[in-house]
């Protein structure tokens, strides 16, 4: 098969990292992969076995403007199909989904990584209708792959204009993550016991909830918040840290290209998001054999935290409830079977699910 990934760019972000991971597995399974990018911005290291095409189309612009560029993509695709026809093209960014929404071709498969259920439910009646109409238009006569069942349930509850909807979880390169988790750490990490959050600094991550919960725990550990993002939000978190008098115990650190060694050394990884598409960092922590505590946000965490781990899923996202679960985990001695949970997300298994699905479409 020739499989395309229609991407905004090749920055180091969740969607692009998943695309690269899948592409490597598809190639190992004997398929050809192409990255089709709107622009040339590049941070990811792409091997020579993946063909990269740049269309020079503006990104992150409104729907009515970006769909005007659909003919450019269509013309490029026509020429490529003459050389070697694509069997499937995965579209995972909002910009690329918008472009293919006006093109009638079942090979364009929407790969849905984010879930809008929380924001949808906060809309008034008229805005909900507008949202449903817009979504129906975007997914009309398209196959959809969602990275969580909760996301698929939400989409199917408000539209049926798609050709099919399937849940396939994100892939994880387990051996690679384990290897990276063994890399040496700076002295700061070695000499301190800590719990951590790793991810974007964004309001939907509700890091103020994490900080407030941390201030209530009994176990003597530090809290490391590792990631980049909104400067204003970071400033608000620093003010809260100072207000609670924990500035000597809570540290906001920049994102590390290899966070896995930091995660492995942590006593626990904590997630307090308002919403998640899947919750990649939870699986990554489990691969590093680091226990996790998460609020039961929509969607993802509840599908990851099965079996024994369900005990550390916080149903009501209040600081005291989160603090109690963190203490229960840190002060207890539960023997957790990490591999039993994370093995189902192994990248080769996930890639084979994609290939079987593509074959069923053709």
Image: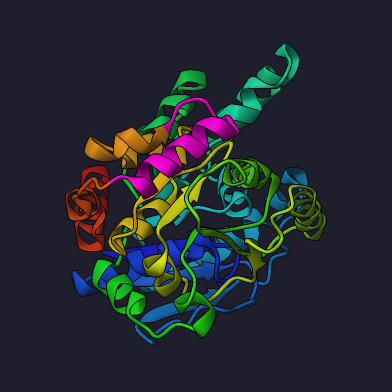
Q: Which residues are magenta?
A: 314-332
Residue at 36% x, 47% y is 331
Prevalent SS, magenta region? helix
Q: Nearer the viewer, residue 136 or 148?
A: 148
- The answer to whether 307 appears left or right of 213 in the picture is left
Q: Classify residue 200 as left or right of residue 152.
A: right
In the picture, residue 165 is in which quadrant? top left
320 within the magenta span: yes
Residue sitting nearer the eye, 283 or 324: 324
Where does residue 299 sit, x and y in percent of width and height? 46, 35
Q: Is residue 343 magenta?
A: no
**In this view, 167 is above or below 117:** below
* Residue 242 percent coordinates (x, y): 78, 54
Asked if one can make out residue 144 in the rendered structure from this viewpoint, the answer is no
Q: Position of residue 27 (x, y in %)?
A: 26, 73
Front residue of 95 and 24: 24
80 in relation to 335, above or below: below
Quick check: 329 left or right of 198?
A: left
């Amino acid at each position: 098969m020739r499989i395309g990934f229609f991407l905004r760019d090749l920055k180091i972000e969740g969607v692009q990292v998943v695309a690269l991971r899948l592409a490597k597995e598809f190639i190992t399974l004997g398929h050809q992969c192409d990255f089709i990018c709107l622009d040339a911005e590049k941070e990811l290291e792409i091997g020579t076995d993946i063909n990269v095409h740049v269309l020079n189309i503006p990104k992150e612009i409104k729907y009515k403007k970006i769909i005007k560029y659909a003919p450019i993509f269509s013309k490029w695709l026509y020429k490529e199909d003459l050389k070697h026809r694509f069997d499937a093209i995965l579209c995972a960014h909002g910009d690329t989904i918008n472009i293919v929404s006006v093109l009638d071709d079942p090979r364009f498969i929407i790969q849905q990584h984010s879930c809008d259920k929380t924001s949808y439910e906060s809309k008034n009646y008229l805005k909900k209708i507008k949202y449903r109409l817009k979504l129906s238009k975007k997914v009309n006569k398209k196959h959809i792959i969602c990275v969580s069942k909760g996301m698929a349930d939400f989409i199917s509850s408000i539209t049926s204009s798609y050709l099919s909807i399937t849940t396939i979880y994100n892939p994880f390169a387990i051996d690679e993550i384990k290897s990276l988790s063994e890399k040496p750490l700076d002295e700061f990490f070695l000499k301190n016991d800590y719990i951590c959050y790793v991810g974007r600094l964004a309001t939907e991550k509700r890091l103020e909830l994490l900080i407030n919960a941390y201030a209530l725990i009994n176990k003597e550990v530090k809290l490391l918040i590792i990631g980049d993002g909104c400067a204003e939000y970071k400033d608000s978190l620093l003010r809260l840290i100072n207000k609670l008098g924990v500035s000597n115990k809570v540290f906001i650190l920049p994102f590390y290209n290899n966070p896995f060694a930091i995660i492995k050394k942590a006593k626990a990884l904590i997630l307090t998001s308002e919403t998640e598409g899947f919750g990649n960092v939870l699986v990554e922590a489990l691969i590093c054999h680091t226990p996790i505590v998460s609020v039961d946000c929509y969607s993802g965490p509840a599908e990851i935290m099965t079996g024994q781990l369900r005990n550390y899923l916080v149903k009501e996202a209040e600081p005291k409830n989160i603090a109690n679960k963190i203490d229960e985990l840190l002060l207890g001695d539960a023997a957790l079977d990490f591999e039993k949970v994370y093995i189902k997300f192994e990248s080769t298994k996930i890639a084979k699910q994609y290939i079987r699905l593509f074959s069923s479409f053709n």
